[in-house]
Image (cartoon, grey):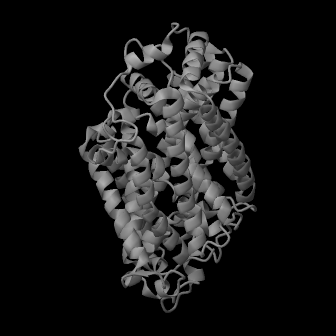
């Protein structure tokens, strides 16, 4: 229910229409699957883990455990915000109602709208190295595998990402949920097969399989395993060693993988039972804990079967461009596990099953963002036509505003001389949005006491302090630590001056849009502050 309105106006007069037109097409379990895809062990996890050699003294396993446990505070923060205001738009709605419309609009529009255009080619790069190139290599299509390593290949993959994501979203939430479940169950099957291969084969089995397949597929020498060890050799912490300082420094790298359990928070206006705080914890926190646990098991199996030194050496050789490396392809552990099958048809099937982790994830590049764009228009900040929905509850104009700009952005990323550098801070901008929501959550019991006290989370306290405030404060500390390290330490690869300037420009554009549309609304006799005093009905 909306709060009391200013005299002379009703909530129905303030918003674009009385109800959003979105449909509650998801269950909380659908939210769990979406969160599991967001912190995607295969697509994101394996990719980010490959950067661990940049901080070789840190323990990758302990960094995953520590960050996963700490990020439970993020899950509590967002589960609480959803329970208080389960509305489409998530971060935008919460920040605009607690911190003010300008802050909410600028942070959410930059962090959920503008920046996700730039994630399309980032998704495409992962599609290439984990799906297209390995499958083409197994099939003996070396020319096709080489193509996807070119700018044209990156742009082609970007268009696959953008168009496929748009098609999936246009089908509506119910159909999307069914497709998501198919990809999840198929991807889990592939993961189970992969882990079983690692469990029931020895290191000597893998050495023989790797040497044979590297020679067959890449034309490597007869002892490719040893050549990889030598090319990527570096001094690393032993598997069970906890060097606390270096491990702590590894955590800001790992959160590129596990910071996203809240990715579906903008969708909870379309989730049945979203006001149930505990169910939200199960969905987001459960996905985080389960994914972290499986990641640890998987890495232990890597150590057993691949060899821990080999796993680090393969990644180090690839990212450093080391001379003497027997192959130039990204060292995909899914493909390495498939080598143990010794049959190209079975190898192709396993990599294809693992690719379902990507195809279940691909829609997330636009889906959550469309609800933020929609919510700003529903509040009448953006033009009303942006809030239009189809009969199956798809905000199709908002979807178009995600798809169309992503095309020239992807072109510039693929073919531009320096444009890819401008996107290095893409994660930082999203983290800033999360920080804004965390601050809003921390002060919500005092800024909006009538909403907080009427919510199901009002009874949860820690030493007399609201649980949402405790969790949000601890999550904010974590984000500030990561932001500080990202900005001050070149190891993480995102403290680039050009990228920071580009991101500042995006924030400036968002601020200009807000000022312009606020002045337009004022000229039309409407004060947007009255909108931000209300909670829209879904």
Write the residue at 45% across / 39% down: 48
In the rendered image, which quarter contains the N terminus? Answer: bottom right
What residue sits 49% from the left and 48% below the top? 116
- The x and y percentages for residue 106 are 40, 61
Tell me: residue 149, above or below residue 450: above
On the image, which quarter does residue 523 sit in?
bottom left
How many marks on residues?
0
Query: Does residue 500 appear anywhere in the picture?
Result: yes
Q: Name the spot of residue 33 as percent of width and height, x first.
A: 64, 55
Query: Could you tell me residue 391's position as x and y percent?
Result: 75, 62
Query: Residue at (66%, 14%) from the top-left corner?
Result: 140
Front in this rendered view, residue 79 or 518: 79
Q: Observer-nearest residue: 328 or 16?
A: 328
Which residue extends farthest left?
488
Against 462, residue 475 (above or below) is: above
Q: 139 or 510, which is in the foreground?
A: 139
Image quadrant occupied by the C terminus: bottom right
Looking at the image, which residue is at 52% across and 56% down?
288
Q: Left or right: where does residue 362 sit relative to residue 435?
A: right
Residue 452 is situated, as x and y percent measured from the top left of the image, at 47, 83
Does residue 384 appear anywhere in the picture?
no
């Amino acid at each position: 229910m909306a709060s009391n309105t200013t005299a002379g106006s009703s909530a129905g007069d303030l918003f674009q229409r009385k109800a959003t037109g979105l449909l509650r097409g998801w269950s909380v379990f659908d939210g769990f699957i979406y969160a599991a895809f967001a912190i995607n062990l295969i697509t994101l996890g394996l990719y980010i883990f490959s950067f661990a050699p940049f901080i070789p003294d840190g323990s990758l396993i302990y960094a995953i455990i520590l960050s996963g446990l700490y990020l439970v505070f993020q899950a509590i923060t967002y589960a609480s915000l959803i329970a208080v205001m389960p509305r489409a738009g998530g971060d935008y709605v919460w920040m605009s109602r607690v911190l003010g419309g300008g802050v909410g609009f600028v942070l959410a529009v930059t962090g959920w709208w503008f920046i996700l255009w730039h994630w399309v080619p980032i998704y495409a790069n992962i599609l290439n190295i984990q799906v297209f190139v390995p499958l083409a290599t197994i099939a003996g299509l070396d020319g096709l595998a080489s193509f996807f390593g070119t700018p044209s290949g990156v742009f082609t993959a970007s268009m696959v990402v953008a168009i496929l994501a748009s098609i999936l979203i246009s089908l509506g939430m119910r159909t999307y949920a069914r497709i998501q479940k198919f990809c999840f169950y198929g991807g889990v099957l592939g993961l189970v097969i992969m882990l079983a291969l690692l469990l029931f084969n020895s290191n000597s089995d893998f050495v023989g399989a790797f040497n044979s397949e590297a020679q067959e597929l890449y034309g490597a020498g007869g002892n490719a395993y040893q050549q990889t060890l030598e090319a990527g050799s570096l001094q690393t912490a032993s598997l069970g060693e906890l060097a606390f300082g270096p491990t702590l420094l590894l955590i800001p790298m790992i959160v590129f993988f596990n910071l996203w359990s809240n990715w579906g928070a903008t969708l909870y206006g379309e989730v049945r039972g979203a006001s149930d705080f505990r169910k939200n914890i199960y969905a987001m926190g459960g996905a985080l804990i389960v994914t972290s646990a499986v990641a640890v098991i998987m890495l232990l199996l890597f150590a057993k079967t691949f060899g821990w030194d080999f796993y680090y050496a393969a990644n180090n050789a690839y990212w450093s461009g080391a001379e003497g490396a027997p192959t130039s392809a990204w060292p995909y552990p899914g493909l390495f596990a498939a080598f143990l099958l010794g049959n190209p048809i079975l190898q192709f099937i396993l990599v294809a099953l693992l690719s379902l982790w990507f195809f279940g994830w691909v829609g997330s590049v636009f889906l959550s963002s469309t609800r933020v764009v929609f919510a700003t228009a529903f509040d009448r900040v953006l033009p009303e036509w942006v809030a239009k929905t189809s009969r199956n509850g798809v905000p199709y104009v908002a979807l178009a505003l995600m798809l169309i700009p992503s095309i020239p952005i992807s072109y510039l990323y693929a073919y531009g001389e320096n444009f890819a550098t401008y996107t290095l801070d893409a994660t930082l901008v999203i983290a800033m949005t999360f920080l804004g929501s965390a601050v809003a959550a921390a002060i919500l019991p005092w800024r909006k006491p009538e909403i907080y006290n009427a919510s199901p989370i009002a009874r949860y306290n820690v030493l007399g302090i609201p649980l949402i405030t405790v969790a949000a404060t601890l999550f904010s500390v974590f984000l500030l630590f990561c932001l500080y390290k990202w900005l001050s330490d070149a190891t993480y690869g995102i403290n680039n001056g050009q990228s920071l300037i580009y991101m500042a420009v995006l924030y400036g554009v968002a601020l200009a849009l807000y000022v312009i549309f606020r002045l337009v609304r004022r000229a039309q006799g409407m004060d947007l502050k009255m909108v931000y005093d209300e909670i829209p009905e879904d």
